[in-house]
Amino acid sequence: MDEHPPRLRVLIADQDQRRIAEIEGVIKKLGHIVVARLFDVSEIAEATQREAPDVAIVGVDGKQSHALDLISAIVKQAACPVIADIVADEDSFIEKAARRGIFAYVKHGERPDMERAIDIVLNRYAEFTRLHGALQTGATIEQAKGILMERHGISPDEAFAELRARARNTNQSVFAVAQAVTISYPLFKPRVIDAD
């Protein structure tokens, strides 16, 4: 049985209509769906919320500062990886774009190059998301342990045992219990009243 790769939802951003059309042609040849074509940074927040793209491609052939602003806005607003499609190699731009959050770049990406870039980006982004989630989970559990230690005067091991026991008794994950502790903690802190 021939298995087709899933169709991705792709956002394309560039300041040049012609470049957007070129990139869109490549994306459609790969069998993916273009869900948004953006020119202006101010359009990104609404479009990414509305369309929930799987990947974003920013074309770079004009003002590099505009492309960098597009990259920054997409990284900030969208939960998807970004590919820069550049016309000419320029190390300083690639370095700046990497600091802004691109996961890959292609040089005027035609079908095979774009296909490889998308595959690489999706794999790297999945790993990034997994690691980010693990770090966030660990930090939340450590914060909850600290709260329990401070409130009950117990050791780190005892605090973790308390979280684990509560998770088992409520049929939740340790992370879910830790999250509840950290969210509710400010409600139970003693309030300091100013003596004016």
Image (cartoon, rainbow, N blue to C red):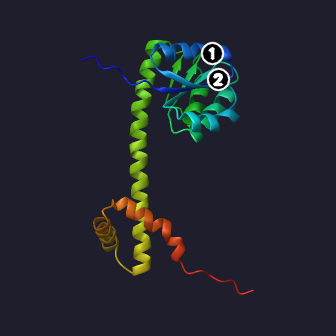
Which residue is rendered at x = 30% and y = 62% of the image? 171
Question: Which residue type does callout 2 highlight?
Answer: Asp
In percent of width and height, residue 144 lies at 42, 67
Residue 178 left/right relative to 81: left
Q: Which residue is mark 2?
A: 14
Which quarter of the image is occupied by the C terminus? Answer: bottom right
Could you say which disc has been placed on residue 168 in the image? none
Report which quarter residue 71 is drawn in.
Answer: top right
Could you say which disc has been placed on residue 19 in the image? 1
Residue 52 left/right relative to 157: right
Kindly check if marks 2 and 1 are in contact, taking CB atoms under 8 A apart as contact.
yes
Q: Is residue 184 above or below residue 32?
A: below
Question: Which residue type does callout 1 highlight?
Answer: Arg
Q: Is residue 112 above or below residue 104?
A: above
Q: Is residue 105 above or below residue 41?
A: above
Choose the circle earlier in sequence order: 2 or 1.
2
Residue in the foreground of this view, choosing between 157 and 89: 157
Most distant residue in the left direction: 1
Which residue is rendered at x = 44% and y = 77% of the image? 150
Residue 71 left/right relative to 163: right
Q: Is residue 22 above or below residue 60?
A: above
